[in-house]
Image (tube, grey):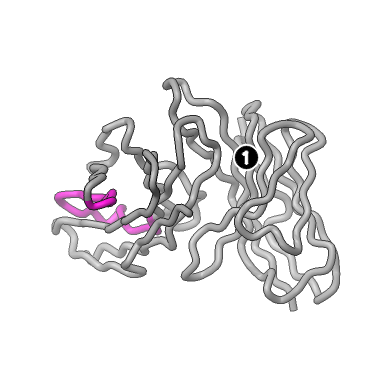
Amino acid sequence: AQRVTQPEKLLSVFKGAPVELKCNYSYSGSPELFWYVQYSRQRLQLLLRHISRESIKGFTADLNKGETSFHLKKPFAQEEDSAMYYCALSSGFGNEKLTFGTGTRLTIIP
Amino acid sequence: NAGVTQTPKFRVLKTGQSMTLLCAQDMNHEYMYWYRQDPGMGLRLIHYSVGEGTTAKGEVPDGYNVSRLKKQNFLLGLESAAPSQTSVYFCASSAPDSLPLVAYEQYFGPGTRLTVT
């Protein structure tokens, strides 16, 4: 069975400090990993996915198959980064289902 | 282009009552999903559909039924509501990506907050 673990329910970081949101997964095959974000009073939306290898809003995430991790990082936090972040896993190419982690609420302290 | 819309936005039910949540998308997506979001538990998949006329169970399907009679609509029904079904319900849709053989980005609706007393 596939599982996504986000060990931190809450994370507070000062503005300008580095941010790292942890995500670990359990899956025996080759997964595809995503980060979704939900800003206050907005709908859940895709932030980035590992296959695109993009940097979105200054965030990056590297898939580490050895450690089964997909941590989200940003070198300098901004106040507008405050949101709920979900890590999600798809079990294979073309697979339509996602398994979500429990989420991390990130608060940026001014 | 409204994307994914959900009706209603809020609802309060008494235990045992029934209701239907409506999800509509105007992006011509093949796949549609219903999730529930509960504090500390993230999003859990209730049911999903890979095309008009087809539905499948997700992680937490008990107590819910769904129908996909039209491609653009996905209905979630609660036949006899229970307090354990108090939650925020999200609908999402997706379609094959422009990149070959990649999993599909899901587009979410604004959510329906349901309280069962």
Q: At 49% from the left edge and 66% from the top edge, which residue is drawn?
A: B41
B9 magenta-colored: no
Q: Quadrant of the C terminus of chain B?
A: bottom right
Q: Nearer the viewer, residue A105 or A33?
A: A33
- Tell me if B110 is positioned left or right of A57 in this view: right
- Residue beneath the point at 79% across and 44% down: B67
- Judge whether B70 appears above or below B6 on screen: above
Residue B33 in percent (x, y) is at 63, 45
The quarter of the displayed image where residue A17 is located: bottom left
Q: Considering the numbered disc 1 on the image, is that residue within a helix, a strand or a loop?
A: strand
- Above or below: residue A14 compared with residue B25: below
> Which picture quadrant has residue B93?
top right
Q: Classify B84 as above or below B92.
A: below
Count the labels in the image: 1
Residue bearing the label numbered 1: B4
Give percent across and percent down for residue A10: 33, 69
B106 vs A101, left or right, is right
| Parent chain of label 1 | B
- Callout 1 amino acid: Val
Q: Residue at x 63, y 35 (%)?
A: B31
Tell me which segment is drawn in magenta: A67-85
Coordinates of residue A48 in the picture (x, y in percent): 35, 39
Instruction: Look at the image and tell me whether residue B40 can be seen.
Output: yes
Task: Depth check: give the residue in front, B27 or A49.
Answer: A49
